Amino acid sequence: MSAEFEHCIRCTLCVENCPVFKVNPAYPGPKQAGPDSERFRLSGEGSVDEWIKLCTQCKRCEVACPYGVNPAETILKAQLKYSDEHGKAPVNLLFANNHYLGILGSLFAPIANLTTKLWITKKFFNLTGIATYLSFPKFYFRSLSKGRGTKNKGGQPKVVFFHGCFLNNNQPALGRAMIELLTGLGIEVVIPRQICCGLPALGNGDKATARRMAKKNTRILTGYIDKGYDVIYACTSCGLTLMHDYPGILEIPGADKLAENVYNIHEYILKLIEDGQIAPEFQPVKRHIAYHVPCHLRAAGQGYPAANLLRRIPELKLTVLDDNCCGLSGSYGFKLKNAPTAIKLGQAAAKAITDSGAEAFISDCGACRMQLGHFSKLPALDPSEILLEALGKAR
Amino acid sequence: MSTVSYDAVIVGGGLAGLTAALRLARSGRKVAVIAKGDPACCLSTGCIDILSGPSGALAALETLPAEHPYRLAGSAKLAEALNFFMETMSSAGLTYHGTATANRKIMTPIGTAKTTGLVPESMRAAWPVAGEPINLVSFTRLKDFFPSYIQARHSNVNLNVFDAGVTSTLAIATRLEEDAFRGHFIDWLASLKLPDGNLYLPAVLGLEEHATVLGEIKATVKREVCEIPTLPPSLPGQRLFRRLKRTLQEQGVDFYWGKEIASIERQKGGAIEAVTLKKSGRSARVEGRAFILASGAFVSGGLYAEQSGNVIETVFNLPAHAPHDRETWFKPGFFERGHGIEAAGVRVDEAFKPLETDYPNLWACGSVLAFSEITKHQCGHGLAIVTGYAAAKSCEEFLA
C-alpha cells in the first residue's frame, strides 16, 4: 500500500492549480478529493462521493505538489472504485471503447461525418449524456493504420511510431506529416499494428479494458525495442499513459522496458540534435505562434521540448502558455454533465491565446487542438507543422 | 537518456531561483529552471518583506549580524536587486510600490497590521489612517475569512456582504473575471453608497485579469481599493508567481517542473556537469556550465534535519550549518521570534559560493542560506530577490 498521501502538509498548492475547482463549486479540489478523503477510503467503506468523477485527471495537482503526494493518482483510484461499485453509464461504456468507435468511424467515414452533424443525432447524443457544444471530430477513410509498414527503410536511427487514436482516425494527414518530418531527418519509421493506449478506458472507469489494451501495446512495442527501435509518440496523453500508467496503476509486465524507451516526438528530435546525430537547418518562419502546453506534457516532467526546438527557428515569435487546462480532457468535456466546466475552462484558455496576439496556436495534444481551435477560432497546429515549415516542407 | 544543455541550471523555482534565472536570461544566457513543485511564494501574501525595522529595511541592514546573507550582498546590491524586481513586475503588468528606506503596513484578515516592504498596487493604501472609516466587503460563506476579527479590532468598520454563489477565493476571483458577473458585482457596490474611506476586500480581485478587475472597481467607487491577503488559495501570491514565470518564458527560459533531481554528475575537477531528473519512465538529463542552488529551507525540502541533529542540504549534499545543540533549536513559544534552527543552512562567501566545498561552478541563494533567520528578521521574499540576484551576478561573471 503506497502512503504518499500521508506526506500532504495541506499547503493548498494543488488546489491553486486545479482547473475544475476554479469553475465548478461542486468539486472540493484535489486536497479534499485526494489525500483528505483517502483515509476514509482505506477503511473499506463504500464510495459515496459522486463528485470524485469531476476530476479531469489533468495532473496539474501532481506537478504542483512539492511533497510527492500524487493527488491525481489517489483520485483516479477512487474514481475506479466508484465506477466498480456504482456501475457505468452508457456514455462511459461508449467512450471507454473509443478505439472501436474510431474504427467504425473511419470505415464508414462519409456516413459517420454526416450523421454526427445531424440535428437528430445531436438530440440523441444529448439524451445519452453526450455534449454537442463541440463538433464531433471528423473521420477519415484513409486512417494512418491503413498505411502500416516501414517508411525510409534503412534510415538511422530506427523508430516505431505510436500514433494513438485521434491522429489515426481524425487527423491522419497530420500523422503523415509527422512521419515525413521524421523520415526527412533520416530516421526509419515503422507504423506498427497498435491499439488505443487505454487512457479513455481508464478515464471512464474501465480498468480491465485499459489493461487489455496496455498489454497488447506493450507486447508489440517492446518487440520492436528488442530489435533496436526507439518508441515515439505524438499525443502527450497517450505518451504519459505509456510511460506512467502502464508500469504504474495498470501494472503491466514488461512496461518498465517500454517506459525507458518511449519518447515524445519533439523530445526525440531535440535529443538527436543535442547528441549531434542530426543538424537540421531551420529557415526563418516569420510568424507569431502561441503554444498551449498540454497538461499531460507538463506532467511528464521532460520540460517543453517543442518550445526548446521552436526557439531555434529564426524570426519565429513563440508565446508559451502553460497555466491553463483546455478543459476537454479527452472524453471529459464530451459528457453533458461536464460540459459547463469544459466550456468555461476552454474559453479561459482560448482567451489567453487570443490575448497573446498570435496568429495561430500549437499544441501537441489532439484534444487541446480541437477544443481551443473551437473557442479561439484560430488555426490549431501541432508543433511538428511549424518544424516542417522551417524545413521548407509546409503542409 | 535524453540530454539538453544550458549555460546555467537553476535548482528551485521559488522567488530566489526565478530572480536568478531572469537575471541570467536577461544577459542572453540559456537558462533552465528545475523545480519539484510550486513554490511557497504562491501561498504568500504577494508582498515583499525586505527587513523589519521602524526606519525601513536599509537602515535595519546595519543591525544584522555580519554573516547574514544581506550583509554579504551589501546595501548597493540590495537596492539594485529590488529595482530589478520592481522594473520586472511593472513590465509584467503587476506594479509594486514601496522602497527599502521605509516599511509600510497592510491589513491582515484578523485586523492586525502586517509590516512589509514592497506591496502590489492593490495593497498600496491597505492600512487606514487614524479614524478613517473602513468600508469592508466580504462574501457569503467565504472560507477562512471572518470579518468579525476586523470589526473587533477596528471601531469604524462598515461591513457589507455579497453572495458570489461560490465560497473560495479562487472561485470568486474566477467569477470576477467574467464580464457579466463583474458588472453585477460592480452595480451592487455602486448601490451601497459607501461613506468616505477606502474599500477593503479579501484578495479575490481576479488572477489573470487582475488589472481590469481592480481598475473597474476603482473607477466605480472612486477611492483606493485595498485587498486583504487571505489564507491559500492566495491570489496575490499566484499573480506574483505567474507573472514572473511568464516573463522568464518570454526570455526563453526552459522549465522542468514537478520532478525531483535523482542524481548529479561531476567532472574530474569537481565541477557539476549535469543533473538527472526522476520522471515517468526514462530519466531526463539536464546539462549546465553553471548551477545555482535555490531549493529553499526545511518546508521546501532544500534542508533536512535528521533525528541525530544533523542538518543536510538535500540536492548537492553541501556542508550545512546548524546550531550544535538540538536543545537550542526551538524556543518554548511557537510564535516567539528567533528559533535557533532558523540559522541553519548553507554558508556562502560574498560571491554566494558555498564554503568548504570544491564545486567551482555552483552558487546558492534564497532561504537555503545559513543565517538568513527569515521569520526573525521578516526578510523572506526580499532575501530571495536580493540573494537570487547577487548569486546570478557572480554566476554571470563566471560564464562571461
Image (spheres, grey):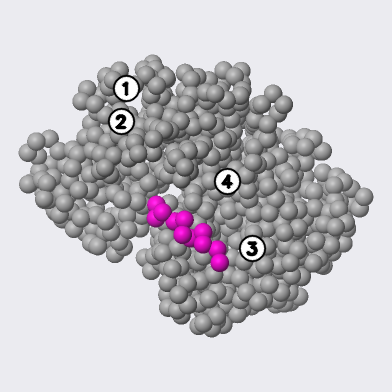
Instruction: Kindly report the distance in space between the C-alpha atoms of the residues bearing marks 4 and 3.
Output: 18 Å
Q: Nearer the viewer, mark 1 or mark 4?
A: 1
Given the image, on which type of amino acid does mark 1 rest? Answer: Leu
SS assignment at label 4? loop
Front-most of residues A85 and B138: A85
* Real-space Cα separation, disc 3 to disc 2, in angstroms: 45 Å
Between B80 and A130, the one lying in front of the other is B80
Magenta stretch: dominant secondary structure: loop
Q: Is residue A315 left or right of residue A180?
A: left
Give x and y (percent) for residue A9.
Answer: 41, 54
Residue A278 percent coordinates (x, y)? 81, 38
The chain letter under disc 2 is B
| Vertical position of residue A287 compared to residue A385: above or below | above
Lower position in the chain sequence, tag 1 or tag 2: 1
Instruction: Give the farthest residue toward the right.
Output: A154
Dot 4 or dot 2, earlier in sequence: 4
The span shown in magenta is: A1-12
| Cα separation between marks 3 and 1 | 51 Å
